[in-house]
Image: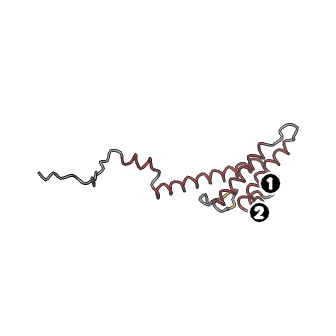
């Protein structure tokens, strides 16, 4: 995926370790945003705190130094939020693509298979022995 003209590796959404790292970093950003002190803080302090949460997200998910590559020396709130959103959108796309591949390969769930077979006449096999009347 390309974020701010920097080519970053795709997150393997089918890998538990990568998804745990992504989810933990994502949760940490949400927690940081929630805990911002809006009263009495200067706007510049809020911008820096929000950007630092996003920087930490990039370093946690893609490795140390990634935030520096993606953002340089900039501490611009819109740039940070747009980059963070772009990663989230890309992960959601990859997740959807992986789910579709799994569905195609493994045929969906039991209820879907039942719905597909509705209306089709099934062959009935009777393997029970019959009593034969010899009279």
Q: How crowded is the residue under tag 1: few (<14 C-alpha within 10 Å), some, or many (20+)?
A: few
Name the residue rendered at 78%, 60% in the picture.
Answer: 68
The N terminus sits in image quarter? bottom right
Q: Where is mark 1, residue-wise?
A: 74
Q: Residue farthest to the top?
A: 39
Relative placement, left or right, of 80 versus 100 is: right
Q: Where is mark 2, residue-wise?
A: 64
Relative placement, left or right, of 3 versus 48 is: left
Relative placement, left or right, of 115 versus 31 is: left
Figure check: 118 above or below 10: above
Find residue 49 and report its horizontal and vertical position in percent.
82, 48
Q: Residue farthest to the front?
A: 135
Q: Which mark is residue 37?
A: none
Q: How crowded is the residue under tag 2: few (<14 C-alpha within 10 Å), some, or many (20+)?
A: few
Quadrant of residue 94 within the rendered picture: bottom right
Q: Disc count in the image?
A: 2
Mark closer to the observer (1, 2):
2
Name the residue rendered at 61%, 57% in the picture.
Answer: 13
């Amino acid at each position: 995926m390309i974020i701010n003209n920097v080519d970053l590796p795709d997150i393997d959404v089918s890998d538990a370790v990568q998804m745990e790292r992504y989810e933990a970093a994502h949760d940490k950003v949400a927690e940081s945003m929630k805990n911002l002190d809006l009263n009495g803080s200067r706007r510049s302090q809020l911008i820096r705190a929000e950007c630092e949460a996003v920087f930490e997200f990039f370093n946690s998910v893609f490795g140390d130094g990634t935030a520096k590559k993606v953002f340089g020396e900039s501490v611009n709130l819109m740039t940070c939020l747009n980059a963070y959103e772009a990663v989230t959108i890309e992960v959601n796309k990859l997740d959807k693509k992986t789910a579709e591949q799994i569905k195609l390969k493994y045929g969906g769930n039991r209820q879907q298979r039942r719905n597909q077979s509705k209306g089709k006449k099934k062959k009935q096999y009777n393997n029970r022995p019959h009593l034969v009347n010899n009279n």
